Image (spheres, rainbow, N blue to C red):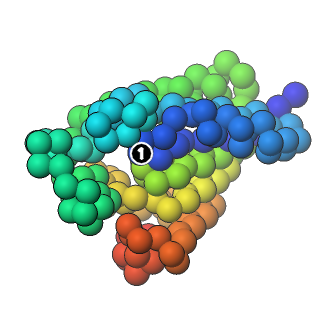
C-alpha cells in the first residue's frame, strides 16, 4: 500500500506528459505519484499545446510580439502583472480540496504528501502549501518563478508551517538570476 504521495506541477507552457515519464521512472517504494496538468491553455502563438496554472499573459502582448523584448520581460512582467487574486485563489482552493479529498478517501497523511513543482508549478506548490495550513512532508521547488505572487497574497511565510523546503535554481538561468531567486526565497 502507498503511504506517501508526490504531486508534480509543471511549469508555464508545459503539460503533464513530460512529468508522466518522470513519475514512471521514480519508482519510489510505497509512493503514489499524481501528475497534475495546468488548467489554462497558453495561446498557441506563444506555446502550442501548452498549459499554465493561472493567467500570466500581458494583454495585447500578441499584437506587439517581439521575441527579444519578450524574453527580457517574460518572467518578471508577464508573470507578475496579470495574475489576479481571484484566479490564483480559485486554482489554489481547488487543489486544497483535491488534497483534502485524497487524505479523506485514501488515508494519506498530510505529513506524507510532497509537492514538487517547476517554475510556475513551483509557485503553485508554494501557494497550495500556504493555503492548506497543514504540515506537509515536503515542498520541492525547482527554478520557482513569480514568488512575489505568494508573498503578495499570503500574510505569513512558509517557514511558519515548518514544512521541509528544497529550493533549487540553476546558475546559468538567463531568465531569473540567482540573485533574484535568492531575494525571493530568503
- Image position of 145 with respect to 48: above or below: below
Q: Number of numbered discs present?
A: 1
Question: Which residue position is annotated with label 1?
Answer: 12
Left or right position of 67 against 10: left
The quadrant of the rendering that contains the N terminus is top right
Residue 39 x, y percent position in the rendering: 40, 28
Residue 170 x, y percent position in the rendering: 54, 71
Residue 29 x, y percent position in the rendering: 88, 41
The image quadrant that residue 85 belongs to is top left
The image quadrant that residue 33 belongs to is top right
Residue 130 appears in view: no
User: Looking at the image, which residue is at 43% across and 30% down?
Assistant: 49
Residue 65 x, y percent position in the rendering: 18, 49
The image quadrant that residue 168 belongs to is bottom right
The quadrant of the rendering that contains the C terminus is bottom left
- Image position of 98 with respect to 20: above or below: above
User: Looking at the image, which residue is at 73% across and 26% down?
Assistant: 107
User: Looking at the image, which residue is at 64% across and 53% down?
Assistant: 138
User: Looking at the image, which residue is at 84% across and 44% down?
Assistant: 28
* Label 1 crowd bin: few (<14), some (14–19), many (20+), radius 10 Å: many
- Image position of 75 with respect to 41: above or below: below
Question: Mark 1: which secondary structure?
Answer: loop
Q: Nearer the viewer, residue 112 or 41?
A: 41
Residue 28 appears in view: yes
Amino acid at each position: 500500500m502507498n503511504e506517501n504521495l508526490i504531486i508534480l506541477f509543471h511549469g508555464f507552457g508545459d503539460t503533464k506528459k513530460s512529468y508522466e515519464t518522470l513519475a514512471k521512472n521514480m519508482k519510489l517504494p510505497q509512493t503514489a505519484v499524481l501528475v497534475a496538468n495546468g488548467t489554462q491553455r497558453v495561446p498557441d502563438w506563444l506555446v502550442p499545446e501548452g498549459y499554465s496554472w493561472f493567467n500570466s499573459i500581458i494583454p495585447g502582448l500578441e499584437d506587439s510580439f517581439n521575441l527579444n523584448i519578450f524574453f527580457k520581460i517574460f518572467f518578471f512582467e508577464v508573470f507578475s502583472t496579470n495574475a489576479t487574486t481571484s484566479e490564483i485563489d480559485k486554482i489554489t482552493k481547488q487543489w486544497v480540496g483535491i488534497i483534502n479529498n485524497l487524505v479523506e478517501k485514501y488515508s494519506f497523511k498530510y505529513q506524507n504528501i510532497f509537492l514538487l513543482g517547476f517554475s510556475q508549478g513551483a509557485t503553485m506548490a508554494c501557494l497550495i502549501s500556504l493555503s492548506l495550513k497543514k504540515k506537509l512532508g515536503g515542498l520541492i521547488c525547482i527554478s520557482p518563478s513569480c514568488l512575489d505572487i505568494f508573498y503578495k497574497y499570503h500574510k505569513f511565510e512558509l517557514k511558519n508551517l515548518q514544512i521541509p523546503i528544497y529550493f533549487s535554481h540553476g546558475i546559468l538561468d538567463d531568465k531569473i538570476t540567482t540573485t533574484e531567486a535568492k531575494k525571493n526565497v530568503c
